[in-house]
Amino acid sequence: MIIRAAEESEMDTVIDVLSEAFHEDPVSMWVFPGDERRAVALPIFHRAVVQGMLAAGGHVDVTGDLSGAAVWAPGGDEDIDDEAFAGLTGEEIGRLMMVFELMTEHAPVGEYHHAQFIGVRKNAQRRGIGARLLKYGLDRNGPVPAYLEASSAESAKLYRRLGFRDHGPAFAVEGGPPMLPMWREPSICL
């Protein structure tokens, strides 16, 4: 399987892949309740995040067939222009800001790469694509540690298989689902 950097012309497809992959994610469901509204809101959200990550010097990796995508940013450099969220409701933006604030509180200090999203189209899941995408990014990042927040028990299992370890207890916005901070030292060999 080919994994490579996404091209600018593929960003609409990247947004579509991430929105499909995270449609039933617990955090996405809490921030954007209602299946129909979530289908509209997730592309707006993912476009804003991807644009912010790229502006901060991040990377977007994709599979050659565009069935999966991973979004990486340098740790601590994930500012998103508020105007990028145009189209989201005030209530949705409020929930997003609560999640972002909590993520910032729990983020590590120092140099690291943040794996913000790893998503695979539903019809291609459970084939090792997410693991390959993550490993590609880890290899590219070389001697720099990696950090992420697992938003489900299933994703935490994948990350542990790839050398990530819990980085403190799970945290959640009041009434929201837990997110588990996870850290990976670069010396882990896969």
Image: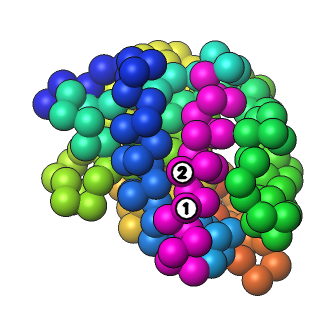
**Magenta stretch: dominant secondary structure:** helix
Residue name at image x 64 percent, y 70 percent: 32
Identify the amino acid type marked 2.
Pro
Identify the amino acid type marked 1.
Val
The reply to whether residue 147 is in sight is: no
Q: Is residue 45 magenta?
A: yes
The reply to whether residue 16 is in sight is: yes
Residue stretch rendered in magenta on the structure: 34-54
Q: Which residue bears the numbered disc 2?
A: 43
Observer-nearest of 38 and 64 = 38
The relative height of residue 77 versus residue 90 in the rendered view (above or below) is above
The relative height of residue 169 versus residue 162 in the rendered view (above or below) is below
Residue 37 in percent (x, y) is at 58, 71
Residue name at image x 50 percent, y 65 percent: 39
Q: Which residue bears the numbered disc 1?
A: 40
Observer-nearest of 81 and 105 = 81
Q: In which quarter of the image is residue 155?
A: bottom left
